[in-house]
Image (cartoon, rainbow, N blue to C red):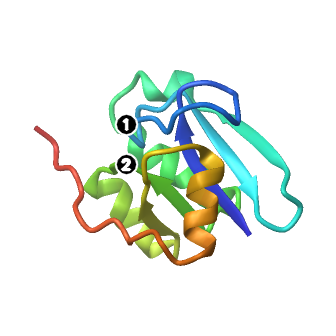
Amino acid sequence: MKIAFPVSEKSINADIHDSFGRAPYFLIYNTISKEVDYLDHRTVAAQGGSGIRAAQVLADYGIKIIITSQCGENAEKFLRSAEVLIYKSISGSIYDNVDAYQNNRLRVLSEFKTRD
């Protein structure tokens, strides 16, 4: 299964970005092969509506789980319709979050940002 994380840089040691739609990259972690890949989101992140465009790209890429600190409501609606689950990240590394997910210690994200 593929898990996506919004990150600030192309590094397994990167912090999880504080905004799903504005993250410059997405780290893709494959739970079966343990491989890591990155999707470049820099040009889209600078524009409006970036969260829903990110959601579309990730769903098309076959992502089934997203672990993030926050997500906008438009992206959430699209992801829900694409049967992608969104979990609230914990403080710590990407590996800490993968371990927490695999051991059922993450909670489903339940609060979503609205436009200001």
Residue lying at 33% horizontally and 49% vertically, measured from the top left: 70
Given residues 58 and 89, the one toward you in this image is 89
Given residues 92 and 57, the one toward you in this image is 92
Label 1 is placed on what type of residue?
Asp
Label 2 is placed on what type of residue?
Ser
> Are dots 2 and 1 in contact, CB under 8 Å?
yes
Compared to residue 95, the image places residue 8 above or below, namely above
Compared to residue 87, the image places residue 83 above or below, namely below
Image quadrant where residue 25 sits: top right
Can you identify the residue that label 1 sits on?
18
Image quadrant where residue 27 sits: top right
Question: Is residue 35 left or right of 47 when viewed as pictured?
Answer: right
Image quadrant where residue 93 sits: top right
* Numbered label attached to residue 69: 2
Residue lying at 56% horizontally and 47% vertically, measured from the top left: 5
Residue lying at 79% horizontally and 45% vertically, measured from the top left: 36
Question: Is residue 98 left or right of 106 when viewed as pictured?
Answer: right
Of all residues, the one furthest to the left in this rendering is 116
